[in-house]
Image (spheres, coloured by chain):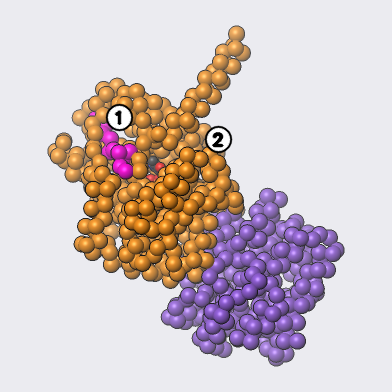
């Protein structure tokens, strides 16, 4: 209970598996369905869930997540309602690691301490803020560590080694490797530099913190290659959102569950 | 010393660099390049060559005698950035940054634009310096400002309508940042105001400070003294900080920034982030924003597209907090009145953005002594706005007719 994320990574390491992390947008397509989406993903084998709290100006996101965030906002999703979604997911899944992915302003506006304690109270395990670099993170880090919340930082293919070391020292829960030069959005293929990046990062992160790779991953084959290069977790976002947008009802949830299953198979190296 | 900010990328608590990690190396590269060239006499000489020979600096400081007499108060001087090549102060910044980009070996320039003024300024600088320009413009603005779109294309730029979010300036900035993330190695992001992550607010301020530097020298030559007040409009805040910076440590010079009051602050339809905003993070900076209680950035309104931005440069947020500058707002209606007054009395059609400053300066002049001096930065010319003003006046005329009919 003290640290669901670390426990999950331990458990998977013993089994020789990598983690499947799935991203959903709270309130997309609506609050109730977003909970069912999480259930479907977990049933399919997702190990960790990232709950996106929609922000009006998501600069690190591509068209898929932008559209989903906007749709959720138009339907009245707010940061507090997103935490309600988290709370009811937590009730159903007491051991599921749950992180929020959002932008700095959502925390800054509400008050760092107030928002993070509320999040903790609702059962959240940590935060991922793509526009919060280590330089600006003093208060964020202090608040999170008092609440025992994970603070996941991102590194990218062009991060220098010195910076990488600094980020590795700060990140908790896992380290988020951005696979490409670019924003979120499903891709059909990756270039060699992505695998090189994973190898380099893994060397520096070593045993200190698990390495997760995200941005653009949409197929089991992507996951396999990245795991072979050293990834201990695979993050799938836009590909999940696309499946939600394309379908509806039971069939959509079924498709999602199957998709999660196929990705999880790749994580088990099956 | 107020002039010594930013310190570690911060103006007091404002500013900083809230950026995705992929941009960190690019920002680092920019910081060190700017640090090198800002102190490099060759760079400064080359920039100064383009500013004088190409863009027409120095711009005049003109005593608006008719306007002054009409008001019957303090003497009003106009800093004529409307006469700068391109028709607005934007060229000071675009030439500076484009030259820096060229020195850094970046050939692909991206920029955002609202009404198109900064897009045109970027296209001009890229054309003369042989760089390629890609301009992001909210789809709504793209539709509203067709003439400027064509102007940018004539100058050789590619212009992309942005369909995301509210389809206006803030979304154009988001899209430019996204493009920068994807093309970070080859691309220079030429931001259009004193906003964004450090070092942009400082750098844009430095390039625009030529305005205030000239004001100081010119008013000294004409009047033998310092102005009592400097007035400028504030969108992102570049012409204002460029006008103010030189005077920050001259405590006797009062500084007034005028935001867009739109249909009135109470109506909620305005762009006055200093007057009515709250603290938050947008576009890489901690500053004052127009946002709802959840932290979602809201849509803004102003008759002038150039002031229609929900954030503001972090240095202004600091100057407001320190009360070193005073921030006020002029409504759409007041801006129109300033626009008309300057056109009729001085034969100068101002852009709608500085019309906000003109209107405020007219009020201020009335309350000041006759031998007091006000300098207003006339940040751009109004050719781009005549149609908007015509529409506004026609609508008002029709409304008035309707009202008088009802009265009968
Ligand atoms: C003529 C003019 N003045 C002022 C502005 C506002 O920008 P800033 O506040 O950065 O000077 C603009 C922006 O487009 C403009 O075109």
Please report the residue visible at 75 percent of the width from the left and 87 percent of the height from the top.
Answer: A270
Q: Which element carries disc 1, helix, strand or loop? A: helix
Stretch of the chain drawn in magenta: B71-85
**Which image quadrant: the C terminus of chain B?**
top right
Distance Cα–Cα, label 2 vs label 1: 27 Å
- Image location of residue A86, percent across then percent down: 71, 65
Q: Which residue is labeled 2 in the image? A: B267
Against B54, is B190 above or below? below
Q: Which chain is purple?
A: A
Q: Is residue B389 visible?
A: yes
Chain bearing tag 2 is: B
Circle 1 Cα neighbour tier, 10 Å, few/some/many (<14 / 14–19 / ≥20): many
Q: Is residue B14 visible?
A: no
Q: Which element carries disc 2, helix, strand or loop? A: helix
Circle 2 Cα neighbour tier, 10 Å, few/some/many (<14 / 14–19 / ≥20): few
Please, which residue is most extreme toward the right here? A250
Look at the image and give the colour of chain B: orange
Q: Which residue is labeled 1 in the image? A: B365
- Image location of residue A262, percent across then percent down: 76, 77
Against B272, is B74 above or below? above
Where on the picture, by quarter, is residue A192?
bottom right
Where on the picture, by quarter, is residue A18?
bottom right
Going from N to C along the chain, the mark reached first, 2 or 1, is: 2
Tell me: is circle 1 under 8 Å from ligand 1.
no
- Image location of residue B316, percent across then percent down: 38, 50
Please report the residue visible at 39 percent of the width from the left and 29 percent of the height from the top.
Answer: B339
Please report the residue visible at 35 percent of the width from the left and 40 percent of the height from the top.
Answer: B87
Task: Please say whether residue A7 is one of the residues in the magenta stretch.
Answer: no
**Which image quadrant: the N terminus of chain B?**
bottom left
Task: Please say whether residue B77 is one of the residues in the magenta stretch.
Answer: yes
Tell me: is circle 2 under 8 Å from ligand 1.
no
């Amino acid at each position: 209970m003290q640290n669901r994320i670390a426990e999950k990574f331990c458990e998977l390491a013993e089994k020789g598996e990598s983690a499947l992390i799935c991203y959903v947008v709270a309130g997309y397509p609506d609050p109730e369905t977003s909970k069912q989406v999480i259930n479907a993903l977990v049933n399919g084998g997702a190990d960790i869930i990232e709950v996106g709290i929609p922000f009006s100006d998501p600069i690190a996101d591509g068209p898929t997540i932008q559209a989903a965030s906007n749709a959720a906002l138009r339907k009245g999703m707010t940061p507090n309602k997103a935490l309600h979604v988290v709370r009811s997911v937590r009730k159903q899944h007491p051991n599921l690691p749950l992180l929020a992915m959002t932008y700095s302003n959502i925390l800054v506006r509400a008050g760092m301490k107030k928002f993070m304690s509320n999040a903790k109270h609702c059962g959240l395990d940590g935060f991922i803020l793509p526009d919060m670099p280590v330089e600006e993170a003093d208060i964020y880090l202090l608040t999170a560590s008092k609440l025992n919340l994970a603070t996941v930082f991102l590194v990218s293919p062009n991060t220098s080694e010195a910076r990488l070391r600094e980020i590795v020292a700060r990140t908790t829960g896992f380290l988020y490797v951005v696979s490409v030069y670019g924003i979120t959005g499903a891709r059909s293929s990756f270039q060699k530099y992505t695998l090189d990046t994973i190898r380099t990062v893994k060397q520096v992160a070593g045993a200190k913190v698990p390495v997760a790779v995200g941005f653009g991953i949409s197929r089991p084959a992507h996951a396999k290659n990245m795991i072979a290069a050293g990834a201990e977790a695979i993050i799938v976002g836009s590909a999940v959102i696309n499946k939600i947008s394309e379908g509806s009802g039971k069939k959509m949830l079924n498709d999602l569950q199957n998709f999660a299953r196929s990705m999880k198979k790749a994580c088990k190296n099956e | 010393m107020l002039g010594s900010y930013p310190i570690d990328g911060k103006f007091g608590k404002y500013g900083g660099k809230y950026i995705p990690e992929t941009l960190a190396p690019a920002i680092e590269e920019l910081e060190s390049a700017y640090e090198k060239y800002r102190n490099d006499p060759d760079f400064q000489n080359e920039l100064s060559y383009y500013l004088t020979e190409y863009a027409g600096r120095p711009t005049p400081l003109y005593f608006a005698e008719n306007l002054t007499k009409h008001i019957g108060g303090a003497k009003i001087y106009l800093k004529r950035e409307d006469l700068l090549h391109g028709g607005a102060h934007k060229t000071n910044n675009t030439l500076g940054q484009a030259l820096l980009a060229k020195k850094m070996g970046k050939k692909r320039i991206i920029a955002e634009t609202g009404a198109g003024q900064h897009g045109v300024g970027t296209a001009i600088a890229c054309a003369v310096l042989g760089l390629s320009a890609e301009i992001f413009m909210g789809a709504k603005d793209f539709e509203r400002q067709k003439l400027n779109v064509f102007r940018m294309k004539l100058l050789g730029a590619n212009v992309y309508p942005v369909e995301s979010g509210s389809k206006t300036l803030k979304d154009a900035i988001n899209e430019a940042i996204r493009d920068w993330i994807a093309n970070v190695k080859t691309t220079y992001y030429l931001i259009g105001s004193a906003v964004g992550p450090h070092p942009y607010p400082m750098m844009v301020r430095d390039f625009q400070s030529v305005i205030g530097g000239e004001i100081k020298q010119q008013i000294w030559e004409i009047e033998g003294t310092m102005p009592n007040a400097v007035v400028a409009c504030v969108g992102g805040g570049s012409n204002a900080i460029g006008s103010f910076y030189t005077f920050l440590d001259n405590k006797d010079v009062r500084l007034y920034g005028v935001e867009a009051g739109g249909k009135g602050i109470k109506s909620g339809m305005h762009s006055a982030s200093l007057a009515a905003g709250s603290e938050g993070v947008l576009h890489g900076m901690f500053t004052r924003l127009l946002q709802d209680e959840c932290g979602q950035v809201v849509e803004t309104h102003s008759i002038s597209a150039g002031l229609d931005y929900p954030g503001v440069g972090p240095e202004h947020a600091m100057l407001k907090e320190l009360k070193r500058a005073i921030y006020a707002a002029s409504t759409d209606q007041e801006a129109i009145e300033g626009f008309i007054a300057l056109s009729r009395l001085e034969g100068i059609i101002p852009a709608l953005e500085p019309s906000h400053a003109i209107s405020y300066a007219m009020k201020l002049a009335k309350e000041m002594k006759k031998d007091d001096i006000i300098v207003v930065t006339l940040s751009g010319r109004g050719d781009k706005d005549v149609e908007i003003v015509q529409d506004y006046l026609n609508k008002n005329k029709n409304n008035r007719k309707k009202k008088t009919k009802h009265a009968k």
